[in-house]
Amino acid sequence: MASKVRVNLTLDEALVAQAKAAGVNLSAVAEEAIRFRTRAEEMRIWSEQNREAVAAWNKRIEEEGLWSDGLRLF
């Protein structure tokens, strides 16, 4: 298990009360949401940084096809 660090968050009071009443683990939800959002941002950055290379690769495949085109049975 990764080590944990204590952080301060400011959340809507009514939402926190509602979550607690429902038995929601706020730390677990926050961690999951931060992990999801961080991964999405990393993918966006990667896509942006590699946009030209991906476009060039797609153009090459469009023009030349794939090496396996003659081998596919479908």
Image: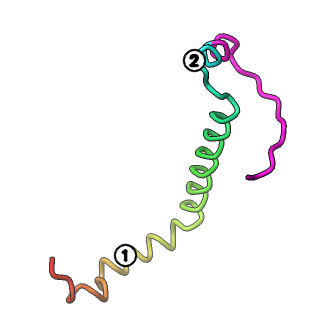
Q: Which residue is mark 1?
A: 59
Query: In the rendered view of the protein, which quadrant contains the C terminus?
Result: bottom left
Is 41 left, or right, of 51 in this rendering?
A: right
Name the disc covering residue 22, or none: 2
Q: Earlier in the sequence, mark 1 or mark 2?
A: 2
Question: Can you give x and y, in whole percent of width and height, for residue 65 in the image?
Answer: 28, 83
| Local SS, label 1 | helix
Magenta stretch: give its range: 1-17
Is 67 left, or right, of 71 in this rendering?
A: right
Q: Quadrant of residue 8?
A: top right
Instruction: Confirm whether the magenta stretch covers residue 15.
Output: yes
Question: Can you give x and y, in whole percent of width and height, for residue 4 in the image?
Answer: 80, 44
Task: State the residue at coordinates (67%, 17%).
Answer: 16
Front residue (pair 35, 57)? 35
Q: Amino acid at mark 2?
A: Ala
Q: CA distance from mark 1 to mark 2?
A: 52 Å
* Local crowd size for mark 1, using a 10 Å CA cut-off: few (<14), some (14–19), many (≥20): few
Task: State the residue at coordinates (60%, 44%).
Answer: 37
Q: Amino acid at mark 1?
A: Lys
Task: State the residue at coordinates (34%, 79%).
Answer: 61
